[in-house]
Image (cartoon, rainbow, N blue to C red):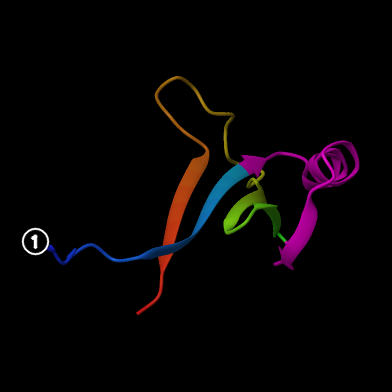
Amino acid sequence: MCFMSTHPQIDQQITFLSTHNLNVSTEFYEQKLGLKLWLDQVTCRIYTVSGSGYLGLCQASETLAPPTDKHSSVIFTLVHSR
């Protein structure tokens, strides 16, 4: 018996992290971890981690307070084709 899934096919996954210093974070992820830049959006830089998995680093707003245990600075994105 074959069941058809009604769930969308996930093609990519991006996890976005905010940073208070994009330049320092960029240097770490590029130089220390060797991640390759996939897309530069000026205030966000997205890196290929593996296959269709990506990591986005985004410059935090000057007024954004550092996260507490009740707040998160992580955005998890699933991308599917139509």
The crowding category of the residue bearing disc 1, from other C-alpha atoms within 10 Å (few below 14, some 14 to 19, many at least 20), is few
State the residue at coordinates (43%, 30%).
Answer: 71
In the rendering, at what x and y percent does residue 49 appear?
Answer: 67, 49
First to last magenta residue range:
18-42
State the residue at coordinates (39%, 24%).
Answer: 70
In the image, residue 7 sits, relative to residue 17, either above or below, namely below
Q: Which residue sits furthest front?
A: 1
Q: Along the horizontal axis of the image, is 2 left or right of 71? A: left
Check disc 1 and report its element: helix, strand or loop.
Answer: loop
Q: Which residue sits furthest bottom?
A: 82
Q: Along the horizontal axis of the image, is 16 left or right of 71? A: right
* Picture quadrant where residue 40 is located: bottom right
In the rendering, at what x and y percent does residue 19 appear?
Answer: 68, 40
In the image, residue 33 sits, relative to residue 48, either above or below, namely above
| 19, 62: nearer the viewer | 19
The question of residue 34 being in magenta is answered with yes
In the rendering, at what x and y percent does residue 69 appear?
Answer: 44, 19
Q: Quadrant of the N terminus?
A: bottom left
Q: Quadrant of the C terminus?
A: bottom left
Q: Label 1, on which residue?
A: 1
In the image, residue 25 sits, relative to residue 54, either above or below, namely above
Total residue callouts: 1
Q: Amino acid at mark 1?
A: Met
* Picture quadrant where residue 64 is located: top right
In the image, residue 6 sits, relative to residue 22, either above or below, namely below
